[in-house]
Image (cartoon, grey):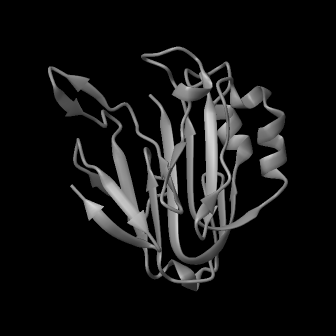
């Protein structure tokens, strides 16, 4: 199963997404060794770094770990290929530009069965709305470190990163977030 993480906040948040944990999930000892990617975004653009290879072997992963970024949106993904070749185009996240805005996308094992879109499968997806998290100012959740500037932050993960405040999304849910808010959920 692929691992997916996303963060959206109203104001720039200092983010370090572990990269010890990220590497372990993307190592040859786990099944998630078919690629990885991370895309922090701010304003109308994003920095997309990804490879169709194990994160544990990546020089980029070590670079990212040593260079925290201030971002309002980030998506990270570790791939376990069930379909498709191990190529850059099959490694998430991916981006498209619409007008002057960069759009970031990732999915977690969504595919088509008999013409119907299906996913995510177990363990599913979970969301945490951090309106009160700002009281902590710094959060450390399973290798994710965030320096919160604001109380309006949303986290989405394939597996809850701690034991507090995560809600499971129903199978097949499509979710769009922006500025620390859910702007579409279907």
Q: Is residue 117 left or right of residue 110?
A: left
* Residue 169 visible here: yes
> In what quadrant of the picture does the N terminus appear?
top left
| Image position of 88 with respect to 183: above or below | above
Along the line of sight, the residue nearer the viewer: 78 or 123: 78
Image location (x, y in percent) of residue 129: 40, 70
Along the line of sight, the residue nearer the viewer: 101 or 111: 101
Along the line of sight, the residue nearer the viewer: 76 or 24: 76
| Image position of 48 with respect to 55: above or below | below
> In what quadrant of the picture does the C terminus appear?
bottom left
Q: Quadrant of residue 117?
A: top left
Q: Quadrant of residue 72?
A: bottom right
**Which residue is at 64% across, 30% downward?**
26
**Which residue is at 52% across, 73% downward?**
9
Image location (x, y in percent) of residue 16: 71, 58
**Which residue is at 25% across, 48% downward?**
173
* Residue 166 visible here: no
Image location (x, y in percent) of residue 28: 67, 19
Q: Is residue 110 left or right of residue 179?
A: left
Q: Residue furthest front?
A: 99
């Amino acid at each position: 199963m692929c691992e997916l993480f996303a963060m959206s906040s109203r104001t720039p948040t200092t983010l370090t997404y572990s990269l010890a944990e990220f590497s372990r999930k993307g190592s040859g000892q786990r099944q998630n060794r078919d690629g990885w990617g991370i895309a922090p975004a701010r304003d109308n653009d994003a920095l997309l770094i990804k490879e169709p290879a194990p994160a544990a072997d990546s020089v980029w992963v070590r670079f990212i770990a040593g260079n925290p970024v201030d971002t309002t949106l980030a998506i990270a993904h570790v791939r376990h290929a069930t379909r498709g070749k191990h190529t850059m185009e099959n490694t998430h996240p991916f981006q498209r530009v619409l007008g002057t805005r960069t759009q970031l996308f990732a999915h977690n094992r969504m595919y088509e069965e008999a013409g119907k879109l299906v996913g995510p499968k177990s363990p599913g997806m979970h969301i945490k709305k951090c309106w009160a998290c700002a009281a902590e100012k710094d959060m450390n959740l399973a290798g994710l470190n965030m320096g919160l500037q604001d109380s309006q932050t949303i986290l989405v993960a394939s597996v809850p990163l701690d034991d507090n405040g995560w809600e499971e999304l129903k199978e097949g849910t499509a979710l769009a977030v922006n500025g620390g808010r859910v702007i579409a959920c279907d």
